[in-house]
Image (cartoon, grey):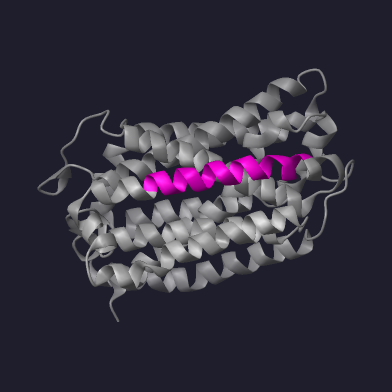
């Protein structure tokens, strides 16, 4: 058994679990100023109140796992994205404080509403910038980061930041379509259409741009016979987009959210096609970046216990708080 490959898939699973689960949570915050009445905002916040902090468990698992399992990758990647990562962590703290304090005041509620919105925007945008920086390539010399402080600030990283903001907004809107009723449901459905269009345009733009960043990326998507193997991915994206718009037009409640999630999953598959078997494109592979095999095995034993526990309590939380959120009831 190739432990480096096993851990690469576990880290990838933790990352996509975070993006999916915390994505709609951040998306609710991104939509916060556009929900109208403060009662509608209460309902939107109550829809994620029981699960929002548990969703961020996967961020800890992904970041901590990268440090423990692929220490060379962590040592190279982090100096390249210190600035957006610091902004992201501060934004997550900021929105977490706003989450708790918003229900404790009436006079200052608007301050915490804006804090929740700003924290969500900055967290999402910073994550997109960090992703764009990794995709566009990190300058490596020997076994260390050789770039500058502002290498993360490029047109491509800004584009991926924007794409993730609108994508999270779409997840948040479709989550509210699924979890709420009345004014909040109608408002979320109304915003889901333009957000879906923007998300697909942003995904398309980034996807077209990406193969021209590295010759290896271009070869994997447009070279033969590789193009035949990866062709199902854009076809599935078209199907997911059709399902999303069709379900919104037909007034479905659950399918829009599942369709939006499938777009993110397919985008992640596309990233995997670009990266594999590198952890830092184009030169650092998962085997070069991996810790000693003894460490990988020791950590795998812990992960075999921890990850199922996280999955069980996450599934239990979502099961307990299933169904629609009623205005005036919930977290206080």
User: Vertical placement of 303 versus 22: above or below?
Assistant: below
Quarter of the rendering containing residue 140: top left
User: What residue is rendered at 57% in x and 44% in y?
Assistant: 197
Magenta stretch holds residue 197: yes
Q: Is residue 17 visible?
A: no
User: What residue is rendered at 69% in x and 25% in y?
Assistant: 112
Residue most extreme to the top: 107
Magenta stretch holds residue 192: yes
Residue most extreme to the bottom: 1
User: What residue is rendered at 28% in x and 77% in y?
Assistant: 2
Q: How far across and how far down the image is residue 312, in percent? A: 63, 69
Residue most extreme to the left: 142
Residue toward you, 244 or 10: 244
User: Vertical placement of 157 versus 135: above or below?
Assistant: above
Q: How far across and how far down the image is residue 27, in percent? A: 62, 42
Q: In this figure, what is the number of numbered marks? A: 0
The quadrant of the picture occupied by the C terminus is top right
Q: How far across and how far down the image is residue 74, in percent? A: 29, 49
17 relative position to 110: left or right: left
187 relative position to 243: left or right: right
Give the magenta range.
187-206
Q: How far across and how far down the image is residue 283, in percent? A: 17, 55
User: What residue is rendered at 44% in x and 41% in y?
Assistant: 127
Residue most extreme to the right: 328
The quadrant of the picture occupied by the N terminus is bottom left
Instruction: Tell me which secondary structure the magenta stretch mostly adopts.
Output: helix
Q: Is residue 325 visible?
A: yes
Residue toward you, 200 or 158: 200
Residue toward you, 275 or 120: 275
65 relative position to 274: left or right: right
């Amino acid at each position: 058994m190739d432990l480096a490959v096993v851990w690469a898939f576990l880290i990838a699973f933790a990352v996509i679990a975070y993006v999916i689960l915390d994505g709609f949570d951040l998306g609710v915050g991104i939509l916060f100023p556009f929900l109208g009445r403060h009662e509608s905002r209460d309902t939107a916040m109550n829809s994620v109140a029981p699960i929002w902090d548990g969703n961020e468990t996967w961020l800890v698992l992904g970041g901590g796992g990268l440090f423990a399992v692929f220490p060379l990758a962590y040592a190279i990647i982090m100096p390249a994205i210190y600035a957006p990562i610091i902004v992201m962590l501060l934004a997550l703290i900021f929105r977490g404080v706003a989450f708790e304090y918003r229900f404790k005041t009436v006079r200052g509620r608007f301050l915490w509403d804006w804090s929740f919105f700003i924290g969500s925007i900055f967290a999402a945008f910073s994550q997109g910038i960090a992703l764009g920086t990794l995709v566009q390539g990190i300058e490596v010399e020997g076994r260390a980061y050789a770039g500058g402080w502002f290498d993360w600030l490029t047109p491509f990283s800004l584009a991926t930041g924007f794409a993730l903001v609108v994508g999270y907004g779409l997840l948040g809107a479709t989550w509210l379509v699924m979890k709420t009723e009345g004014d909040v449901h109608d408002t979320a459905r109304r915003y889901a259409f333009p957000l879906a269009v923007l998300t697909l345009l942003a995904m398309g733009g980034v996807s077209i741009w990406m193969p021209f960043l590295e010759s290896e990326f271009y070869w994997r998507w447009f070279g033969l016979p590789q193009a035949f193997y990866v062709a199902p991915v854009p076809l599935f994206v078209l199907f997911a987009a059709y399902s999303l718009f069709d379900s919104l037009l037909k007034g479905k409640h659950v399918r829009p959210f599942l369709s939006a999630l499938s777009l993110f999953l397919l985008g992640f598959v596309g990233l995997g096609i670009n990266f594999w078997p590198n952890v830092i494109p184009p030169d650092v592979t998962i085997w070069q970046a991996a810790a000693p095999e003894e460490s990988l095995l020791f950590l795998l034993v812990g992960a075999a216990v921890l990850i199922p526990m996280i999955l069980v309590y996450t599934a239990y939380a979502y099961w307990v708080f299933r169904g629609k959120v009623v205005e005036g009831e919930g977290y206080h």
